[in-house]
Image: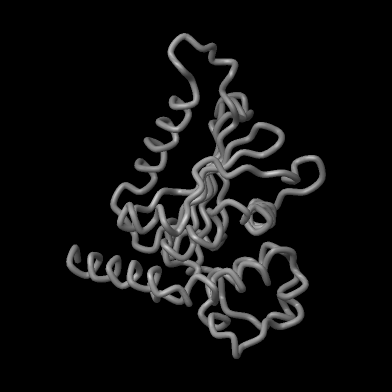
Amino acid sequence: MPADSLLHDIVFKLVFGRIGKEPILRPLLNALLQLSGSDKITELTILNPISEKKFADEKGTILDLLCRDAQGRRYIVEVQIKSQDHYIARTVYYAAGQLRSQLEPGEAYGKLERLVILSILDFELFPEQKDLHSMNVLYDVAHRRQLTPLLEVHFLELKKFKKDKPARLRTPFERWLHILKFSQLYSSKTWELPEALRDEEGIQMAIDTMRETLSNHEIQALIRARDIADHDAA
């Protein structure tokens, strides 16, 4: 993944996962999860914030974004660029661990908070279906009802999102998908955001923060080191 893209794991984490970046992460979640009305996130706390200094000290260790809203719902946001074997099994295993980690020994199960996982994928997970957004829950097949709202898993397959003129992007969902997939177009300060994107809450802040992040020499060094490590692993 090119370094000047929001989908680069280091860039994504630093743009959306630092203290003070909640005004960017909140509209991203509202748009991609298509939340409205009483379900819309109004306040958000990042539970595992990262700083540039800590990032450097930990040699670029990447953690998925973990946050919690005012209604007690927890969100995990991750970006996955390369297809992995058993990716769905990995997601289920990860979700189970995150739910279990909410409780201390002896605490009641009633204290469990709803967990929503958002996986932003730059590959096709379900090539047999045209929809790029799939939402998955625990489901009682016989009685056709949701078993529990405690776990919700969303997959967004960016490969299925086609480039379109910004003026034709009608919804926050489409505008944020465009920015995530084509952020390279706006990484340079010489390129201004089209008005249709500028007016969408959080997008201008995300691009400004990405540009600021990419101008940091220490972060550039971390990105190069990560890319070299990826090539070596391949």
Query: Residue shown at 54%/15% (left/top)?
Result: 109
> At which x and y percent is residue 218?
38, 69
Asked if residue 189 can be seen in this view, the reply is yes
Q: Nearer the viewer, residue 102 or 86?
A: 102
- The percent coordinates of residue 8 (x first, y second) are 42, 67
Residue visible at 58% across and 69% down in the picture:
209
228 horizontally vs 63: left or right: left
Residue reaching furthest to the bottom: 190
Q: How many marks?
A: 0
Looking at the image, residue 224 lies above or below residue 88: below
Quadrant where the C terminus is found in the figure: bottom left
Identify whether 73 is placed above or below 11. Answer: above
Which residue does the image show at 67% across and 52% down from the upper left? 26
Corner quadrant of residue 180: bottom right
Quarter occupied by the N terminus: bottom left
* Residue lying farthest to the top in this orientation: 106
Q: In x, y percent, where is residue 140?
A: 56, 26
Q: Which residue is at 71% across, 33% downward?
A: 71
Q: Position of residue 74 (x, y in %)?
A: 58, 37
**Residue 178 visible at all:** no
